[in-house]
Image (cartoon, rainbow, N blue to C red):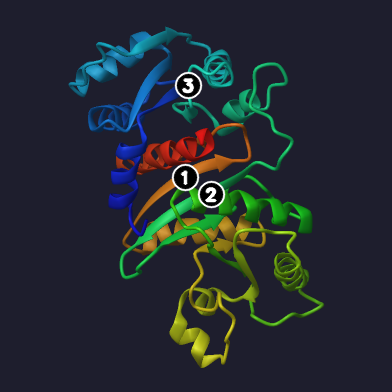
């Protein structure tokens, strides 16, 4: 899948899946859920302040008839209930509504009804950028602060799983650094080379990992050719692994604000997709994220 039109098309074919929306009293979330429902991508269970939700829906001319709705005004309790619906099998994924990320993640990690797997939780953003013939997977811009080598390995594995859900059988993974040569004084370049070797040794599977790469020679074949780089990932990367959350967050927001792009975001590493977007994201980004979650849930169900 090379753009979000294709992502939504295949989500329609492989859905619908059921979303559990935590703290559903949010304009953009309701618009996205309404679009997803009408297009046949997903069904939804709305958990939160139902009075406020109904007021918002009325203003937006959204008909909530037929939705299952659970009234829970407390944000933490609503998040916990939404997660419980997934862990009990009533829903296939959980979506963040009008609630802080820390609250929804606490519910996801709840020992009794949460979605723990023992794996690292990481954020994967997917970008459809004008002028490129493929989607880009960017990680991690929201979860892992300063990942060590093992954490970076799991971040790669999480992102590869998302890419597989979009039918990318052997994604090319670029470990981004400030330069494309190993420098002992730059620990992230050392990690990048080790991650490449781990892939060659079979410790990281179903992808091709390369590193270190600077951003230009990871995404541009012309830049890679100029540097004389012949690695199979050079200029052809699908997945961009950032060295830490600072780099990841800056790259994410740079693409969002400086490029003509469409995006989606999800937390990976739990038992089910956790659709997590910014409060500032519009309904299209949220719809794209739902479609991404549907494809991931469809892949997991197989």
- Residue at horizontal 52 percent and vertical 48 percent from the top: 162
Residue 91 - label: 3
Tell me if mark 1 has few (under 14), some (14-19) or many (20+) residues whose alpha carbon lies within 10 angstroms of its own. many
- Residue at horizontal 73 percent and vertical 21 percent from the top: 111
Evaluate if marks 2 and 3 touch, with contact meaning CB atoms under 8 Å apart: no
Vertical placement of 101 versus 48: above or below?
below
Q: Between disc 2 and disc 3, whose residue precedes?
A: 3
Evaluate if marks 3 and 1 touch, with contact meaning CB atoms under 8 Å apart: no
Query: Could you say which is closer to the camera, residue 169 or residue 277?
Result: 169
For the residues carrying marks 2 and 3, which lies nearer the camera in this image? 3
- Residue at horizontal 51 percent and vertical 36 percent from the top: 302
The residue beneath circle 1 is: 265
Query: Could you say which is closer to the camera, residue 265 or residue 294?
Result: 294
- Residue at horizontal 21 percent and vertical 24 percent from the top: 60
Does 210 sit left or right of 258 as displayed?
Answer: right
Name the element at disc 3: loop
**Spatial separation of the CA atoms under disc 2 and disc 3:** 21 Å
Does 4 sit left or right of 151 as displayed?
Answer: left
Residue 108 - label: none
- Taking the view exactly as shown, the residue that stands out farthest to the right is 184
- Taking the view exactly as shown, the residue that stands out farthest to the left is 61
- Looking at the image, can residue 214 be seen? yes
Residue 34, percent across and down?
27, 27
Residue 263, percent across and down?
39, 51
Q: How many numbered tags mark residues here?
A: 3
**Spatial separation of the CA atoms under disc 3 and disc 1:** 19 Å
Can you say which quadrant of the picture contains the N terminus?
bottom left
- Looking at the image, can residue 146 be seen? no
Evaluate if marks 2 and 1 touch, with contact meaning CB atoms under 8 Å apart: yes
**Spatial separation of the CA atoms under disc 2 and disc 1:** 6 Å
- Taking the view exactly as shown, the residue that stands out farthest to the front is 302
The residue beneath circle 2 is: 124
């Amino acid at each position: 899948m090379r753009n979000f039109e294709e992502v939504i098309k295949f989500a329609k074919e492989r859905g619908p899946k059921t979303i559990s929306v935590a703290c559903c009293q949010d304009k953009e979330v309701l618009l996205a859920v309404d679009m997803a429902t009408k297009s046949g991508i997903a069904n939804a269970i709305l958990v939160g302040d139902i009075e406020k939700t109904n007021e918002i829906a009325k203003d937006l001319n959204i008909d909530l008839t037929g939705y299952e709705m659970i009234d829970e005004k407390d944000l933490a309790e609503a998040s916990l209930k939404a997660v419980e619906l997934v862990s009990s099998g009533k829903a296939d994924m959980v979506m963040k509504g009008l609630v802080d990320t820390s609250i929804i993640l606490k519910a996801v990690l709840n020992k009794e009804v949460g979605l723990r797997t023992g794996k690292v939780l990481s954020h994967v953003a997917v970008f459809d950028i004008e002028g490129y013939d493929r989607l880009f997977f960017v990680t991690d811009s929201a979860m892992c602060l300063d990942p060590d080598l093992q954490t970076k390995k799991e971040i790669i594995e999480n992102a590869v799983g998302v890419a597989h859900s979009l039918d990318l059988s052997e994604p090319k993974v670029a470990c981004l650094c400030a330069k494309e040569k190993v420098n002992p004084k730059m620990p992230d370049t050392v990690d990048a080379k080790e991650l490449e070797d781990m892939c060659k040794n079979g410790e990281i599977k179903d992808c091709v990992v390369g590193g270190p790469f600077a951003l230009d020679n990871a995404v541009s074949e012309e830049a890679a050719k100029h540097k004389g780089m012949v690695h199979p990932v050079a200029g052809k990367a699908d997945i961009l692994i950032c060295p830490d959350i600072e780099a990841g967050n800056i790259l994410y927001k740079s693409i969002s604000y400086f490029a003509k792009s469409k995006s989606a975001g999800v937390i990976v590493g739990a038992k089910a997709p956790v659709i997590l977007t910014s409060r500032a994201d519009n309904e299209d980004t949220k719809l794209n994220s739902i479609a991404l979650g549907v494809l991931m849930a469809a892949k997991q169900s197989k």
